[in-house]
Amino acid sequence: MGFHRRHISSEMLLNAYKHGGIDNVMEWYKGCDAIVSEMGIASEITDLMYEEQLDPKETRKKIIKILKNKIKNGQ
């Protein structure tokens, strides 16, 4: 039995959002045993996914806001 570790970068999340919206971003966090995220928005989003005690709708709103701000201000 293997251990599935996923490395998540800000660029991966931005591309996922641009090409498939928030649902595409959320997919990156499914089906893995561990997540390694780079500093910046990748770690902010990972924290929101796993550490904050928000309802799913509120989590999605916060993630969308982070990604839109990053796109607006340039990658």
Image (cartoon, rainbow, N blue to C red):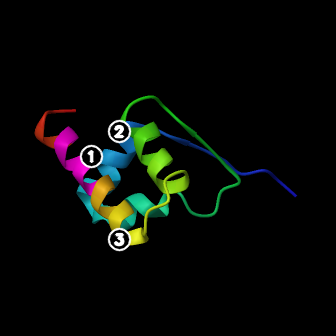
Residue tagged 3: 57
Residue furthest toward the front? Answer: 53
Give the foreground label among 1 and 3.
3
Comes first in the chain, label 1 or label 3:
3
Residue tagged 2: 11
Comes first in the chain, label 2 or label 3:
2
Quarter of image, res 75: top left
Q: Amino acid at mark 1?
A: Ile
Location of residue 27 in the rendering, given as x and y in whole percent from the top left corner: 47, 63
Location of residue 34 in the rendering, given as x and y in whole percent from the top left corner: 67, 48
Give the foreground label among 2 and 3.
3
Q: Name the secondary structure under disc 2.
A: helix
Give the foreground label among 1 and 2.
1
Q: Amino acid at mark 2?
A: Glu
User: Main SS type for the magenta part?
Assistant: helix
Q: Residue at x 42, y 70 (%)?
A: 56
**Closer to the camera, 75 or 54?**
54
Q: Residues within 10 Å of mark 1 (few under 14, many from 20)?
A: some
Q: Is residue 3 left or right of residue 25?
A: right
**Closer to the camera, 49 or 4?**
49
Q: Name the secondary structure under disc 3.
A: helix
Q: Residue at x 13, y 34 (%)?
A: 73
Do callouts 1 and 3 mark residues in contact (Cβ within 8 Å)? Answer: no
Marks 1 and 2 sit apart, C-alpha to C-alpha, by: 13 Å
Q: Residues within 10 Å of mark 2 (few under 14, many from 20)?
A: few
What segment is highlighted magenta in the picture? 64-70
Q: Does 62 appear above or below 55? A: above
Q: Residues within 10 Å of mark 3 (few under 14, many from 20)?
A: few
Q: Residue at x 11, y 41 (%)?
A: 72
Query: Which label number is shown at residue 66?
Result: 1
